[in-house]
Image: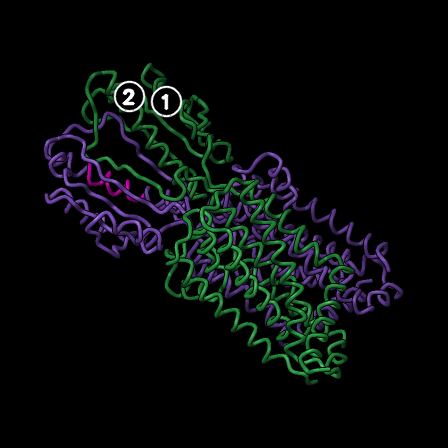
Chain colours: A green, B purple
Amino acid sequence: MSARGGARMRLRGLVRKEFLQIVRDPSSIAIAFVMPVALLLLFGYGLSLDVDRVPVALVAERPSADTSDFAGSLEGSRYFAPIAMSAMPAAEQALLDGRVDAIVRLRPDFAARERRSSGAPVQVIVNGIDANTARLVEGYMDGATNAWLARRAAEQGVPFEAPVEVEHRVWFNPDLRSRNFLVPGLVVVIMTLIGALLTAMVMAREWERGTMEALIVTPVSVGEILLGKLIPYFVLGMGGMLLSVAMATWLFDVPLTGSFWVLLLTSAVFLLVALGMGLLISSVARSQFVAGQLALITTFLPAFLLSGFIFEIRSMPAVVQAITQLFAARYFVAIVTTLFLAGDIWSVIVPNTLVLALMAVLFLGLTRLRTRKRLE
Amino acid sequence: MWSRILALVLKEFITLLKEGKSRAVLIVPPLIQLLVFGYAATYDLKHVPYAVYNEDPGPGGRRLVAMLRGSSSFDEVATVTSIDQVAPLVDSRKVLLVLHVDSRFSRDLLAGRPARVQVIVDGRNSNTALIAVGYLRNIVAGFNRAWSDERGLPAPPAALETRAWFNPNLESRWFFLPGIIGILTLLVTMVITAMSVAREREQGTFDQLLVTPMRPVEILLGKALPGFIIGILEATAITLIAVLWFGIPLLGSLAALYLGLALFLLSAVGIGLMISALAVTQQQGLLGAFLFMVPAVILSGFATPIANMPAAIRLITLLDPLRYFLVVLRELFLEGTPVTALVHQLWPMALIGLASMTLAGWLFRHRMY
């Protein structure tokens, strides 16, 4: 038998053994197929940053036609669900208890001062603890007040216009649906988890159980052992990826603007990085316990917080930005959100894919170096 | 009884801390993660890259652009001279927004007609896009006020006066830091407990433990205490960094904080042991820890409000101890809420803790192979 034929046979044997192990311990299958479905369903529906009918307390300290006109304009806004309250203490208690997110206070002299040139102040108190929601509420409140002012001015025949008006156009996601970027971002987080979980423990397990020693005495080379580990989990991981993309487009209606084949290719590169990182952890740790801890620490939270999926990388301090460059999720989030929402923009896809390819080579190469057929 | 528990606790500590690698992954990462995530987790925008496309020859456009340049939230990275240059800049993510001032801007402004500026914003992250547009609108509102004052134009008949309670500058870092304390505490305790029983199962030593005179309650306590103690110590260190390094105020009482922490750890350790008791191999233990951790963090209200979730998912969050602990942390840090007002957050954690502990103890005896 030729040397190459022997290598192919050995590799086939290893892949077959790994597949059998996967089929017999259903936890790997659960990781690859059940986890993406369950997590995407949960998070795709659960995560939303869109402000919708925020409860606000409306306190008109001396109700008049003007204050009820203002209240009516808030009721009409789809962003607010105003609750009329008679006095400030009740409203303040509601804000403290979290029953309302903001208080709008119209002072007793509202109607009188509105007719004078100084203008009537409308006091808005927001609960600053959730600063993001507070700021969105503030912005929408501003918009609702301006709409009210414009309508009243039109009714009274005195047009009121600000000197400069801003018109904004949002590219790629004109309706500002937060789900459109959260779902592709979640796909990246989930794939990071799957990649690391599938492989983080497989090498450590062989060391811990002593089966690595059995492999060492066979003619299999280290490269063959690693390929034998990589191929089955790559196939599983791509299956999970396809499932996630199908759910994102058909269930969550995220438009896939770019090409499906580019997405598939870049996903394959990313999966190699994720699996390579798992294998590296596994070969460095040698004990399943340490491998498990490392996988928990290095995958989920960095992919969630440092990938630019939720928090804007460009606003982080330079040191933290440099740290984000160590995590593959960051590059894949840029690729995936661009492919889904903006299309095949090569100036984003090519450099990020190159970095991912480099990381894949690095992780797999390091794993190859760290794994020796030697006992310690 | 206590001496037997103590012996088991000591043995657990020795297995956790004897090996250098295992010791290091317990102690170092949470502290580094707090520092990194503490800076990373904020919705406030700084250095938003933008480009200006100013077609206006007059002074109005120049003045508006100057105001934008003076803002610390924005960094000008490119100047655009034709409309064709806009798309490549936005597409390649070199700029987040482009401010387009058209050629009639100064003419309209001086004539008292509404002058329009157009903003093109990259909506790939719609939240960032909304925040950036909000910042820009504030700058334009400042421009409008200054312009109206100088010309003696009438002020609008009503104006908003906004005040934010508990976080006057609306710094979102203050919102996220207490959340990170909760998440890291959960991570540490899950790491310790989720694999502890599974490891003994895989190595066969758990069967030996079961035939010793130790009762299941004693095994349970012996397994739970190390996670609990390390959790308390780690949370203390993390809180100290949050207060001393990041300068977040701690308005509430320390006793209330530790009461909340103890109940949270009870539930986290209970769930960790339950997962561990269910798992036959360490891999399953790790998988279980992930399957609990990931939803527990994402659905806790840490990054997106629970109020935005659909009713069915809000029901699921009721089982998430982190959800209650986040409220306790935020209220204690930022509002200084008295402990009596936090009872509705505390009893669910106690309940989850007791239920999961009981179940874990039951599983010790009844899940055997």
Image mark 1: chain = A
Q: Which residue is mark 2?
A: A151
Residue furthest top in the image:
A65
Q: Which residue is mark 1?
A: A73
Distance between mark 1 and mark 2 Cα atoms:
10 Å
Find residue B269 and report its image quarter.
bottom right
Question: Is A107 in the magenta?
Answer: no
- In-image side of A220 versus A159 (left or right): right
Task: Give whichever of discs 1 and 2 has the lower sequence position.
Answer: 1
Question: Is B140 in the magenta?
Answer: yes
Residue drawn at the location 38% of the way across and 19% of the way down: A72
Give residue B123's position: percent from left, percent from top.
Answer: 38, 45
Residue furthest front in the image:
A1
- Name the amino acid, label 1: Ser
Give residue B260's position: percent from left, percent from top.
Answer: 60, 49
Which quadrant would the C terminus of chain B be assigned to in this image? bottom right
Find numbered disc 1 in the image and state the secondary structure of the residue it sits on. Answer: helix
Is the C-beta separation of discs 1 and 2 under 8 Å? yes
User: Magenta residues, as a range?
Assistant: B135-144
Residue drawn at the location 20% of the way across and 37% of the way down: B144
Camera-nearest residue between A128 and B118: B118
Residue drawn at the location 44% of the way across and 52% of the way down: A311
Residue drawn at the location 22% of the way across and 52% of the way down: B80
Q: Is residue B260 at all visible to an observer of this figure?
A: no
Image mark 2: chain = A
Q: Is residue B286 at all visible to an observer of this figure?
A: yes
Find residue B129 and report its image quarter.
top left
Find numbered disc 2 in the image and state the secondary structure of the residue it sits on. Answer: helix
